[in-house]
Image (cartoon, rainbow, N blue to C red):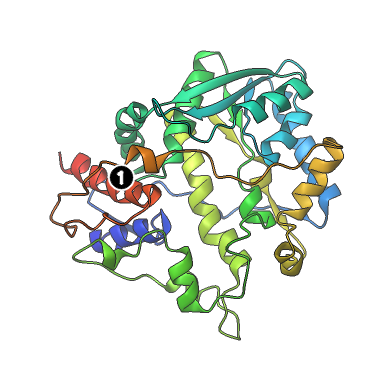
Amino acid sequence: MIVDKRFCMSSYLMFRTIVNREKTFFDGAQPRLWDANRSYVDIHDSVELEDHLRRRVHQVMQSGKKYALALSGGIDSAILAKFMPAGSKAYTFKCVVPGVQVTDETPQAARYAAECGLEHEVVEIYWEDFEKYAPLLMKHKGAPMHSIEVQIYKAALRAKADGFDGMLFGESADGKYGGMSGLLSKDWTLGEFVNRYSYVLPYMVLRDFELIVEPYVRHMKADGRVEVHEFMNDVFFKESIGSYANATDTAGMELCCPFSETMMAVPLDYERIRRGENKYLVREIFNRLYPGWETPAKVPMPRPMNEWFARWEGPTRPEFYPHCTDNMTGDQKWLVWALEQFLNSFES
């Protein structure tokens, strides 16, 4: 491993992961990264995708090990819920900010659970959970982490205490099947996409930084535009599924994400997405399984970072500029906070 703290700090801020598997922050802190070098099931249409999802859920539930479902208010996990045996357990995350109403997926998830005959349980998430579990998750990962890992980890601990061996998630449907409609909304030049996708541009935060563009350049087409879906199946997919894997592995639980085991074998229909039909293959399955139901709006896994970081004054370590987070969103502040916590934790 090559120790390159500047590269790793910059990479985490831009991509939420270390995009070069040969580099690490410090000696002895090897990042645990998702290995995407595996075979995938080719998917040509929604029927093939539905068949795969149904088959994988059946295989897992008949494997002799006990699996629970992570059930959100979206359509991806709702599809998996239809394939779970009646009476199966489903957990839904609910972030809580005392005195403040924040996004709550539990009512919609409860509707899915009732429709499918599942036993439904809500796992409440507090800021104190982030302070408690983030150091453990980052130590296991050997790198700073995605904010969703705390929620996944706490739910996995609850499921483990309830006697389960693993959890099923609807993860990867968005990246693989065109759910990121904002990113897919136009043809991006390299410079445009670097600015649009990068979570935090490192020169806004770090005194010693590196602007890492190779992952973007790798997915440029001959006309100079970025092939966004290809990029999502590479950089975004590895980062996102790696976060789920780290959280469940740290909890000592197995992970099954049936969407992640697939790959579109036909070109993504960008025009269809830009007309308002994002994730159209997944929507077709949902409409077959839940006829007459309104398709809920796409929302990220709820985490009220704007509220939790409203009073945070920013990092104090010498690697960072003073006041660098003053105009950031809560999600961006999380990345800077997590990076500083990781550096503090490792050095201590």
| Quarter of image, res 154 | top left
**Which residue is at the front of the view, 136 or 340?**
340
Locate residue 210 relative to residue 221 in the image: left or right.
left
SS type, badge 1? helix
Asked whether residue 249 appears in the rendered view, the answer is: no
Which residue ends up furthest to the left in the rendered image? 318
**Which residue is at the front of the view, 69 or 294?**
294
Which residue ends up furthest to the bottom in the rendered image? 223
Query: Taking 229 as reference, is 311 above or below it?
Result: above
Residue 125 position, x and y percent, is 44, 27
**Which residue is at the front of the view, 132 or 246?**
132
Residue 330 position, x and y percent, is 37, 47
Callout 1, which amino acid? Ala
Query: Taking 264 as reference, is 313 above or below it?
Result: above
| Quarter of image, res 318 | bottom left
Locate residue 91 relative to residue 17 in the image: left or right.
right
Kindly identify which residue carries mark 1: 338
Residue 147 position, x and y percent, is 41, 41
Q: Residue at x 71, y 25 (%)?
A: 111
Query: Taking 57 as reference, is 321 above or below it?
Result: below
Locate residue 251 relative to residue 267 in the image: left or right.
left
Q: Quadrant of the C terminus?
A: top left
Q: Quadrant of the N terminus?
A: bottom left
Q: Residue at x 60, y 80 (%)?
A: 221
Asked whether residue 105 appears in the rendered view, the answer is: yes
Q: Residue at x 20, y 66 (%)?
A: 208
User: How many numbered discs sit on the rendered protein?
Assistant: 1
Residue 284 position, x and y percent, is 82, 48
Query: Taking 219 as reference, is 100 above or below it?
Result: above
- Neighbours of disc 1 within 10 Å: few (<14), some (14-19), many (20+): many
